[in-house]
Amino acid sequence: MLTHKAAVFPRMLERLWVLCGVCCLEGSPLWWTCVHRIHHQHSDHSADPHSPHESFFWGHMQWIFIADPRQHSLATYAKYIPDLVNDPFLRWLHKRHTWALVYLAHAVALAAIGFGVGWLVTNTPAAAVQLGTQFFVWSVLVRTVYVWHITWLVNSAGHRWGYRNYDTADRSRNNVIVALLTNGEGWHNNHHAAPRVCSQGHRWWEIDLTYTAVRALELMGLAWDVVPVASVRQSATRRPEHQVVNEATRSCPN
């Protein structure tokens, strides 16, 4: 939605999806979009922020802990996300790490729900605390760490193991296990071949539940300009590296 403009949603739904992403504790949407566009422009080359060409661990998570001045440079943001940097909602989330406060607020809200349900079900403080704690651990802590690792697997395993439908200029692979864990994002070679295509599953058996959800919203009039798989025919050949970024940042509804 933000990086590739593969689909457009009503403003309120767009902001809801952004907030859901923020509640995964993976950084500011502006930062994430910028890094992802850099990745596409320099995929599996030296300027790629998280290619596993160094090592699996580097591509999986080590890159996050190594300072990269590009990722926090105003000049970099102006180059890679000129279509997003002036969005007031995204700027608000980015400024002073507001996105982290949103995550904290959602964690507190889920904990409160857990303790509330525990109290209603058990009517005893000790049992309510136990049930509420279990709800917090599974709905916040375990879920967050799980989403971290399946996201990182797209960067690491998705560039090392699997098969290729397209002869792209990078090492992207379609990884069945990652696709199952991420509701379709593991068809990563397909994605690199045609970044703007909404569906990452290009063969009939490459299931992409995220795309299924977008199609359902489209049928209800809550999504439009959904880029079809048919456009892969124009996108899947080797292209100059700058073209991916040009496609992603071209003028369109924000």
Image (cartoon, helix red, strand yellow):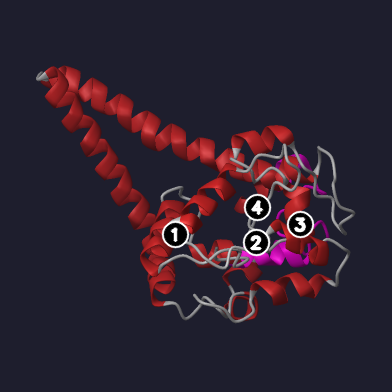
In this rendering, the label closer to the viewer, 1 or 2? 1
| Percent x, y of residue 212 | 56, 46
| Mark 2, secondary structure of its residue | helix
* Left or right: residue 147 compared with residue 60: left
Mark 2, residue position: 36
Circle 3 residue = 192
- The residue carrying pointer 3 sits among few (fewer than 14), some (14 to 19) or many (20 or more) residues within 10 Å by Cα, namely many
The reply to whether the C-beta atoms of the residues labelled 1 and 4 are less than 8 Å apart is: no
Kindly indicate whether the residue at mark 4 contacts the one at mark 2 (C-beta within 8 angstroms): no
Which quadrant of the structure image shows residue 197? bottom right
Locate residue 75 relative to residue 40 in the image: left or right. left
Q: Mark 1 to mark 4: distance in Å?
A: 19 Å
In x, y percent, where is residue 190?
76, 51
Residue of label 4 = 199
Label located before the other in sequence (1 or 4): 1
Magenta stretch in the rendered image: 34-59
On screen, residue 78 above or below 203: below
Rounded to the nearest whole Å, what is the CA distance between mark 3 and mark 1? 22 Å
Q: Label 2 amino acid?
A: His
